[in-house]
Image: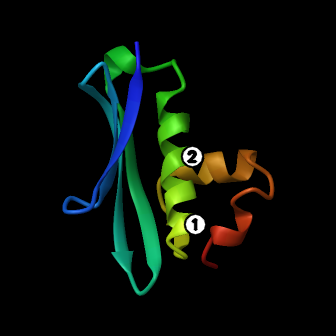
Amino acid sequence: MSATITHDNADHRFEIYVDSELAGYSEYLERDGIRTFHHTVTLPHFRGRGFAAALTEHALDDTSMQGLRVVPACWFVRDFIEAAGDKYSDLVQH
């Protein structure tokens, strides 16, 4: 089972696929150099395998590489950032 993460710029979301099947996504709004992550979903039969964490890590790394800031409106993204210690704390827009 291989997982692939893509960035759908047009729909403002990151997607994770497992063997070419959509397993989850993280949606955001982008404005004035800030990505507001507002919704993260793992489809039911893919839950409990760390896909949301892998997706969130990829999305935050991409956001950092783009020089953007983050508003973690989604509880999962917020909890992920908090659990990561200082790794992503500098991305958070206060």
- The answer to whether 36 is drawn above or below residue 32 in the figure is above
Identity of the residue drawn at 21% across and 58% down:
11
Outermost residue on the bottom side: it is: 32
Identity of the residue drawn at 51% across and 47% down:
58
In front of the other: 22 or 19: 19
As measured in the structure, the alpha-carbon distance from the residue carrying label 2 to the one carrying label 1 is: 11 Å
Q: Quadrant of residue 18?
A: top left
Q: How far across and how far down the image is residue 6, in percent? A: 34, 45
Tell me the residue that label 1 is attached to.
64
| Crowdedness near tag 2: few (<14), some (14–19) or many (≥20) residues, C-alpha within 10 Å | some
Answer with left or right where residue 37 lies relative to residue 22: right
Task: Specify whether residue 76 is in view.
Answer: no
Q: How far across and how far down the image is residue 47, in percent? A: 43, 20
Tell me the residue that label 2 is attached to.
57
Answer with left or right where residue 48 lies relative to residue 4: right
- The answer to whether 3 is drawn above or below residue 85 in the figure is above
In front of the other: 74 or 24: 24
Identity of the residue drawn at 55% across and 76% down:
67
Outermost residue on the left side: it is: 10
State the quadrant of the N terminus. top left
Answer with left or right where residue 56 lies relative to residue 12: right
Q: Secondary structure at mark 2?
A: helix
Q: As shown in the figure, which amino acid type bears the numbered disc 2?
A: Glu
- The answer to whether 55 is drawn above or below residue 36 in the figure is above
Q: Secondary structure at mark 1?
A: helix
**Circle number at residue 26:** none
Which of marks 1 and 2 precedes in the sequence?
2
